[in-house]
């Protein structure tokens, strides 16, 4: 016969196992109101909060968390009568899982998110907010869930599995990031959320591919090479790109380049026996010293094309020496000696001028020289990461302030593209496309395609002037029209509750905040080069602060960017522009151009 203590231990073990098994049940959101949650009704244990319920309470902004997806503080929902329920913080959820659901639309996906709460601070847990964002875009979706105010969870409840409502209308073959935040949200701490990235179908194992869902012909049209690399050997230019998946059955590709007033078309047939993922081909009939705008796509009807730029550089090959007479050899040596002497003299003059410039600008001449050697490569777009596309940024500016200001914009664009992982679109770099599409057509297309838009605000952006030529008048009219269009886009996005993070304005130290047009008042503002880390954080969604740690991106700080060749050139351009504006007489009145948005 068993002793009583053993029987008691067995009963406790069985009851604990049953309790743990029950706590692992999945909790799906219920339909209930904020009033029910605030009263602590037992029937309102885990509830979804709709936009209509949120608008009932005047203390919560009308935009609501469903438009801008900002994590609203706990007291906005639950702490009006009892503020103490929102005074404690909780840790981030854990074990985020993505579950794909059957979608009625064949061209889109649907998912459900599940997670476990953290056991740290779980007794003060008041709810969750789930955010879904398409990487490389500005589309954000949010769901808000709250727990009853009288509910107090125990550490054993950390085994519970909470689920969200389905997220629908997700694009195929795309990357998303889901973030689950625990409420109450702290003000200075960032351990209240957990993030997970995932791909929709056709990049996951054991999932139906794009051809299985939409048909092979439709997937061929939508696919395009995401990785394109150009390299030159002497006068031969080679292009390497990634091939379509084998299931697409694409056996031939089409390449077209335009430059020097001529267009060259090339039919590309890869050898799949040698390589099934990438292929390299040679561009034909190209000229040295010419810029080409090229496209490549699958050789099918209405296929999406990938655009890239090719700059053919001059090369000097060594010629074989011939048997020359002795007199001819002496003449050759004499010419070489004169050439070396002239080169030494020119080198001395250049070094002397650079030393003088060093005393004026306090910059290291070797940094500027190193940058000048790479100046021709600053405008190229090379995707170093084959899986994640860098953010695309359109820079708009006014050329009325003169060449010094335009040089600052050019050096800023080069620095952003080379050292801040951004694909910059600038009209100074895409003259061929502007000639084909027109100035306004190119700007309108880039405004739609780019992930971010940065307007460089200066005194000339708000001034009228007597135009000296039709080209200057056209450029200024384009700048004014773009400001008006961006202002209208921001007002429309604000009215529809969308995020405004796409639009930014920036000023340099020789400009003022009063130079920012009224129509751009809703855009994020940055002062360069002081706010370079903040601009990097905005473009890549990187948090600069962590618990007890300040994240500093290498060579992008206010004092460290000038250590890079491109940063040194940007600093020099800013100093020259500042000196020029300080020498000009100050205008007593600055006439602002009214913009109707």
Image (cartoon, rainbow, N blue to C red):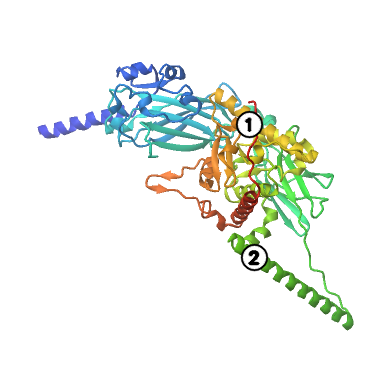
Could you say whether the residue bearing mark 2 is in a helix, strand or loop? helix
- Say above or below: 439 vs 107: below
Mark nearer the N terminus (2 vs 1) = 2
Callout 2: 10 Å neighbours few (<14), some, many (20+)?
A: few
Give the residue at mark 2.
356
The answer, for residue 443, to whether it is visible in the render is yes
Q: Residue furthest front?
A: 588
Please give left or right for residue 528 compared with residue 432 in the image: left
Q: Position of residue 541 (x, y in %)?
A: 51, 40
- Residue 52 horizontal/vertical position (percent): 45, 17
Q: Where, quadrant-wise, is the C terminus in this rendering? A: top right
The Cα atoms of the two marked residues, 2 and 1, are separated by 43 Å
Where is 474 relative to 360, above or below?
above
**What secondary structure is found at the residue carrying circle 1?**
helix
Image x and y of residue 592, in percent: 64, 33
For residue 14, above or below residue 257 = above
Q: Residue at x 14, y 34 (%)?
A: 6
To which residue does mark 1 refer?
A: 486
Circle 1 Cα neighbour tier, 10 Å, few/some/many (<14 / 14–19 / ≥20): some
Say whether residue 262 is left or right of residue 347.
right
């Amino acid at each position: 016969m068993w002793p009583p203590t053993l029987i008691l231990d067995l009963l406790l073990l069985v009851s604990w196992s049953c309790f743990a098994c029950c706590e692992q049940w999945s909790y799906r959101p219920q339909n209930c109101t904020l009033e029910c949650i605030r009263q602590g009704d037992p029937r309102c244990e885990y509830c979804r909060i709709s936009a209509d319920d949120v608008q009932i309470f005047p203390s919560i902004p009308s935009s609501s968390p469903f438009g801008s997806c900002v994590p609203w503080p706990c007291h906005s929902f639950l702490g009006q009568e009892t503020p103490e329920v929102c005074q404690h913080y909780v840790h981030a959820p854990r074990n985020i899982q993505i579950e794909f659901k059957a979608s009625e639309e064949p061209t889109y996906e649907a998912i459900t998110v599940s997670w476990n709460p953290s056991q740290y601070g779980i007794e003060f847990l008041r709810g969750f907010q789930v955010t879904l964002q398409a990487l490389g875009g500005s589309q954000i979706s949010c769901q808000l869930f709250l727990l009853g105010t009288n509910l107090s969870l125990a550490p054993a409840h950390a085994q519970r599995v909470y689920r969200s409502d389905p997220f629908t209308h997700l694009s195929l073959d795309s990357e998303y990031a889901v973030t689950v935040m625990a409420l109450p949200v702290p003000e200075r701490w960032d351990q209240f959320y957990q993030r997970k990235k995932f791909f929709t179908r056709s990049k996951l194992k054991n999932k139906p591919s794009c051809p299985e869902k939409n048909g092979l012909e439709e997937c061929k049209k939508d696919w395009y090479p995401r990785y394109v690399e150009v390299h030159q050997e002497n006068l031969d230019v080679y292009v390497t790109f990634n091939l379509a998946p084998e299931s697409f059955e694409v056996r031939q590709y089409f390449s077209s380049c335009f430059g020097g007033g001529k267009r060259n078309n090339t039919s590309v047939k890869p050898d799949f026996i040698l390589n099934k993922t990438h292929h390299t081909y040679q561009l034909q009939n190209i000229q040295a010293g010419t810029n080409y705008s090229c496209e490549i796509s699958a050789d099918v009807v209405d296929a999406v094309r990938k655009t890239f730029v090719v700059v053919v550089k001059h090369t000097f090959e060594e010629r074989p020496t011939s048997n020359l007479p002795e007199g001819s050899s002496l003449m050759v040596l004499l010419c070489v000696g004169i050439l070396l002497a002239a080169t030494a003299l020119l080198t001395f003059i250049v070094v002397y001028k650079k030393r003088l410039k060093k005393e004026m600008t306090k910059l290291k001449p070797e940094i500027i020289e190193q940058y000048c050697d790479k100046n021709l490569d600053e405008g190229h777009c090379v995707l170093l990461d084959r899986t994640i596309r860098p953010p695309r940024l359109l820079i708009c500016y006014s050329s009325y302030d003169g060449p010094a200001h335009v040089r600052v914009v050019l050096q800023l664009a080069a620095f952003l593209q080379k050292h801040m992982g951004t694909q910059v679109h600038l009209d100074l770099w895409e003259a061929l496309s502007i000639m084909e599409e027109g100035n306004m057509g190119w700007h309108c297309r880039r405004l739609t395609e780019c992930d971010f838009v940065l307007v460089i605000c200066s005194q000339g952006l708000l001034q009228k002037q007597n135009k000296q030529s039709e080209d200057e008048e056209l450029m200024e009219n384009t700048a004014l029209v773009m400001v008006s269009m961006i202002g209208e886009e921001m007002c429309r996005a604000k009215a529809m509750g969308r995020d405004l993070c796409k639009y930014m304005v920036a000023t340099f130290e020789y400009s003022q905040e009063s130079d920012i047009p009224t129509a751009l008042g809703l855009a994020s503002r940055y002062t360069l080069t002081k706010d370079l880390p903040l601009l990097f954080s905005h473009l890549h969604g990187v948090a600069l602060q962590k618990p007890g740690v300040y994240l500093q991106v290498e060579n992008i700080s206010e004092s460290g960017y000038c250590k890079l060749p491109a940063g040194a050139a940007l600093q020099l351009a800013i100093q020259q522009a500042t000196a020029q504006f300080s020498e000009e007489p100050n205008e007593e009145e600055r006439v602002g151009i009214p913009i109707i948005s």
